[in-house]
Amino acid sequence: MHPSEEIKFEKSTSLKNKRICLCLTGSVACVESFYLCRDLIRHGAEVNVFMTESTTRLIHPDLMEFASGKKPILELTGRTEHITLCSDCDLVIVSPCTANTISKIALGIADNPVTTCVTTALGYGIPVIIVPAMHLSLMKNKAVERNIKKLERLGCKVLKPRIEKERAKIADREMIIANAIRLVGKRDLEDKNILIIGGASAERIDDIRVITNRSSGKFSIELAREAFERGANVELWYGWMKEKIPSYIRTKEFESVKDLSDMVKYTKKFDFIIVCAALSNYIPRALDGKIPSGIKGLTLDLETAPTIIDEIRKICKKGKIIVFKAEEREDKLIEKCKDLSNNFYMVVGNLITSFGKEDTTIWIFKKGKMKKVSGNKKDLARHIIDIMVS
């Protein structure tokens, strides 16, 4: 068994049975291509690598053969690799993609294994992801800008580079993988607008202190990632988070329940609204300045917080609202969730012992039916979305 087979499905089965042509061009960012190839395989893909001559001067083809388990295509031969491999694949990724290659593809020039692979794929209507990487002066060149727009008109997905000083750096690997899965996956949420509200609210005590809770926000991130990969237009509104939010997810930040209440008016455009945030039920009457240290028996005066899910229900009459409920005991949780499910499209229940943990159990309620599911939060997010769209 080749070492590339040993890592297959380590991360997911999202790219199972998918054939991907990974094209490398002569940007120094091609040093990242080894890791991209390995991650595509970890999600289940079969990867064929195409390299330009200039790429082979930066990284050796043996490295990519080890990464993929297959000899890279360095030249086109009588085996017509551009037809046998490119016309029968599910996706082409050009990463990194230089200004030179961008312009050649835009003009239909097929003069090396990479440009011929992409030209063939576009001719067959196969999805193509372009991942630019170059000096910023090249990216800002008017001709290159026009050619990037032309690629988009031809149907290519062009991922925006990370701009750092004078460099247009390659998009992060997580973004490339997520877009690959999005293009060849289920797409059962295509054209759907989904809002996810996650994280913990934080309520002001004085000018420097807040009351918050132990929610990590991980569930909301996994739900956002799952919805994005299935084709949705996703927006994540988040409070305090312990987890890093993927760069490809659109976001808006809030701190307090009051902040979130002010944002509710913008929920009308969404088809589904998932509220999994741990929001405060009580709000302190905050003091200006800083409460002096050392006060014994300090008492906080609390008032009831607005109920955000009720506010959303009033504003977003056509949207399908999914709410989360946490309780200490299973019997109490099931009772409360059944009651909530009479008023909302779907309810997800979990015990408070699950806060901050990766593996947990949830109870999903929809249309009078209940399903109990256990697993890690990534798998549970998939179950929630599956039932949401069913």
Image (spheres, grey):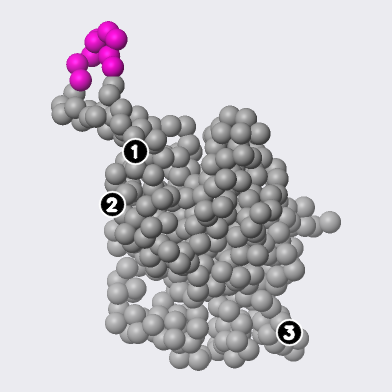
The three-letter code of the residue at mark 1 reads: Ala
Judge depth for marks 2 and 1 and give the one in front: 1
Residue hosting label 3? 84
Q: Residue at x 62, y 30 (%)?
A: 329
- Label ID, residue 262: 2
User: Which secondary structure lies at badge 3?
Assistant: helix
- Residue 60: name its quadrant: bottom right
First in sequence, mark 1 or 3: give its number: 3
Alpha carbon separation for disc pair 2 and 1: 13 Å
Picture coordinates of residue 12, whole percent (x, y) = 68, 55
Q: Position of residue 123 (x, y in %)?
A: 59, 91
Residue 33 in picture, x, y percent from top left: 57, 62
Residue 309 in sight in this render: yes
Q: Residues within 10 Å of mark 2 (few under 14, many from 20)?
A: few
Is residue 173 found inside the magenta-colored segment of the image?
no
Q: Which residues are magenta?
A: 291-299
Residue sitting nearer the eye, 230 or 108: 230
Q: Find the residue positioned furthest to the right.
A: 1
Earlier residue among tags 2 and 1: 2
Mark in front: 2 vs 3 = 2
Give x and y (percent) for residue 387. 65, 59
Mark pair 1, 3: CA separation: 63 Å
